[in-house]
Image: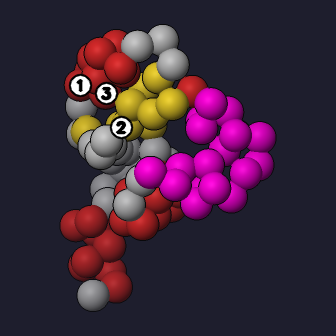
Amino acid sequence: MKYKEYTDPKEAIQEAGRLGSTHSACASRACPTCKQSAYFALPISAIKAYEAGALIQQAFPFLSADQRERFMTGYCQKCWNELFA
Ligand SMILES: [Zn+2]
């Protein structure tokens, strides 16, 4: 299954509810430039692994590289493109 990122935390919470008690909504770091966070509905076990210090690609192998970058650094696609493209 594919995990989506949401701009509205309510949507991530709803999605986590659909996925059941194994999943929880969580926010990425806020974008350093525009201060927006992305929200995901992710497996609680993966969130815990990441918080415990697992490498992000080990904790979240099911996210795309872009999504992992977003989660870790907070940079959204728009700001990333403006800064680095
Ligand atoms: Zn941004």
Q: CA distance from mark 2 to mark 1?
A: 8 Å
Look at 58% across and 60% down and name the residue there.
Answer: 57
Residues tagged 1 and 3 counted as in contact (Cβ below 8 A) = yes
Q: CA distance from mark 2 to mark 3?
A: 6 Å
Task: Name the residue beneath numbered marker 2.
Answer: 39
Q: Is mark 1 within 8 Å of ligand 1?
A: no
Report whether 16 appears left or right of 68.
Answer: left
Question: What kind of residue is marked 3?
Answer: Ala
Question: What kind of residue is marked 1?
Answer: Glu
Q: CA distance from mark 1 to mark 3?
A: 4 Å
Visible residue check, residue 70: no
Q: Quadrant of the C terminus?
A: bottom left
Question: What kind of residue is marked 2?
Answer: Tyr
Residue 33's image quarter?
bottom left
Q: Residue furthest right?
A: 52
Residues tagged 2 and 3 counted as in contact (Cβ below 8 A) = yes
